[in-house]
């Protein structure tokens, strides 16, 4: 086996794509900054007790684990940055009011999320802590819409759900934890025949409501139908009111899916996923997750989203490669001053190395620094 072969679903990022990724990263972090979100940088490694707290079984399966040679304790390579940011808010910052945080970094997964996915996604996201109302969900959703617009993606849409609907039906219907997990899996798969079998032992009203959930997909008309046909439980009434307000915004096309329970064991309210015409997998995931900080001593209300930067960069329109300026290698103060001036202005200036003066740097440099009438000036090559 060739010793330079990378593991499956792990890849190198070459200069043109790396340039697009870095450009988008900088633009998105600046967008978050001007909206009041402060940047944090959690570590790649943590003890599993804190890294997996409140994230559910799925995250445990996706996390690479190893033994710390210093302490003998089990550590994990993070598979998601959001729990780490919740820890920072709850345990380190310890603020009483609303806190807005953002982040960007690589995560590692034991298995890829899909056939075309990498096991080393690059996550970038924003979170609001300390506010429990729908207004913070709306702020996060609008910020996501601005981020997607900045990336110039084709035919973007947002699918919104609310875990409180199914959770209320399960609690009121006396569904035990084992059956709840099976129902969750069937709803995620939109497996109506499995749902019909699983709900046989439930009460008539609960069974009818759960069987209805896969049909509650579409535009804002779904909310009206859900209000008519679902039980009038307070939790469901509040959830539908939240969805009504969130889908009223016009920043991005929105659809509703009450059978989408993505992150059911992790989220506590609204959930959403952003899709684009050229990619089958979601390019952004988010929602409300009020319980994650509890294990860190403060169960702060929280809402936020994560974007997948590698996919964004590949879908965004390609920018022309920046040209560069070739300069001769001479020990001359005027030449050094000219190169410094150009670099301060953002230009790429590359000096020739001995023996390579005529190689043209693989065609990257279309201009050169030449001396004319005693001055160093830029001319087209």
Image (tube, rainbow, N blue to C red):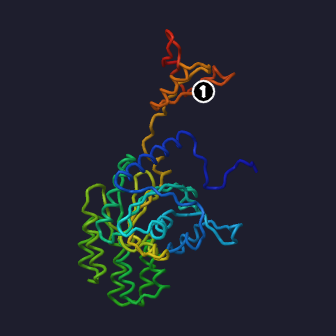
At horizontal 75% and vertical 48% (from top left) the residue drawn is 2
Q: Position of residue 158 (x, y in %)?
A: 35, 60
SS for callout 1: helix
Relative to 42, say whether 51 is above or below: below
Q: Is residue 267 left or right of residue 239?
A: right
At horizontal 63% and vertical 68% (from top left) the residue drawn is 75
Relative to 151, say whether 95 is above or below: below
Q: Is residue 217 left or right of residue 325?
A: left
Which residue in the rendered view is the most extreme toward the front? Answer: 333
| Front residue of this view, candidates 281 and 326 | 326
Q: Is residue 219 left or right of residue 53?
A: left
At horizontal 48% and vertical 26% (from top left) the residue drawn is 341
At horizontal 30% and vertical 63% (from top left) the residue drawn is 138
Q: Residues within 10 Å of mark 1 (few under 14, many from 20)?
A: some
Query: Which residue in the structure is indicated by mark 1?
Result: 361
Relative to 201, say whether 100 is above or below: above
Q: Quadrant of residue 79?
A: bottom right
Which residue in the rendered view is the most extreme toward the right? Answer: 1
Q: Position of residue 332 (x, y in %)?
A: 59, 18
Relative to 125, say whether 60 is above or below: below
| Front residue of this view, candidates 366 and 370 | 370
Q: How many marks?
A: 1
Q: Position of residue 367 (x, y in %)?
A: 51, 22
| Front residue of this view, candidates 371 and 255 | 371
Q: Quadrant of residue 68?
A: bottom right
Q: Position of residue 276 (x, y in %)?
A: 40, 53
Which residue in the rendered view is the most extreme toward the top? Answer: 373
């Amino acid at each position: 086996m060739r010793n330079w072969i990378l593991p499956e679903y792990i890849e190198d990022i070459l200069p043109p794509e790396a340039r697009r990724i870095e450009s988008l990263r900088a633009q998105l972090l600046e967008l978050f900054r001007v909206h009041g979100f402060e940047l944090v940088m959690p570590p790649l490694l943590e003890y599993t007790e804190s890294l997996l707290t409140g994230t559910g079984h799925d995250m445990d399966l996706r996390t690479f684990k190893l033994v710390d040679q210093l302490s003998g304790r089990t550590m994990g390579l993070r598979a998601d940055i959001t729990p780490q940011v919740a820890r920072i808010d709850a345990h380190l910052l310890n603020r009483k009011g609303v806190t807005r945080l953002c982040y960007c970094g690589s995560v590692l997964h034991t298995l890829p999320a899909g056939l075309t996915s990498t096991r080393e996604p690059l996550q970038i996201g924003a979170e609001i802590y300390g506010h429990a109302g729908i207004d913070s969900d709306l702020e996060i959703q609008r910020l996501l819409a601005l981020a997607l617009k900045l990336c110039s993606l084709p035919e973007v849409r947002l699918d919104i759900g609310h875990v409180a609907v199914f959770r209320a039906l399960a609690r009121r219907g006396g569904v035990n934890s084992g059956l709840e997990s099976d129902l969750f899996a069937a709803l995620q798969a939109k497996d109506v025949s499995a749902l019909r079998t699983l709900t046989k032992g439930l009460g008539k009203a609960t069974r009818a409501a759960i069987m209805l959930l896969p049909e509650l997909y579409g535009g804002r008309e779904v909310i009206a139908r859900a209000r008519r046909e679902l039980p009038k439980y307070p939790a469901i009434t509040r959830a539908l009111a939240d969805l009504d307000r969130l889908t009223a915004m016009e920043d991005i096309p929105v659809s509703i899916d009450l059978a989408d329970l993505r992150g059911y064991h992790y989220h506590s309210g609204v959930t959403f996923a952003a899709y684009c015409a050229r990619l089958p997998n979601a390019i952004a995931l988010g929602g409300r997750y009020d319980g994650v900080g509890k294990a860190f001593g403060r169960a702060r209300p929280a809402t936020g989203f994560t974007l997948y930067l590698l996919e964004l960069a590949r879908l965004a329109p390609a920018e022309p490669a920046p040209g560069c300026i070739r300069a001769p290698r001479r020990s001359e103060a005027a030449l050094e001053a000219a190169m410094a001036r150009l670099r301060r202005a953002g230009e790429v200036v590359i000096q020739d190395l001995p023996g390579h003066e005529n190689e043209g740097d693989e065609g990257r440099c279309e201009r050169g620094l030449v001396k004319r009438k005693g001055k160093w000036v830029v001319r087209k090559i």
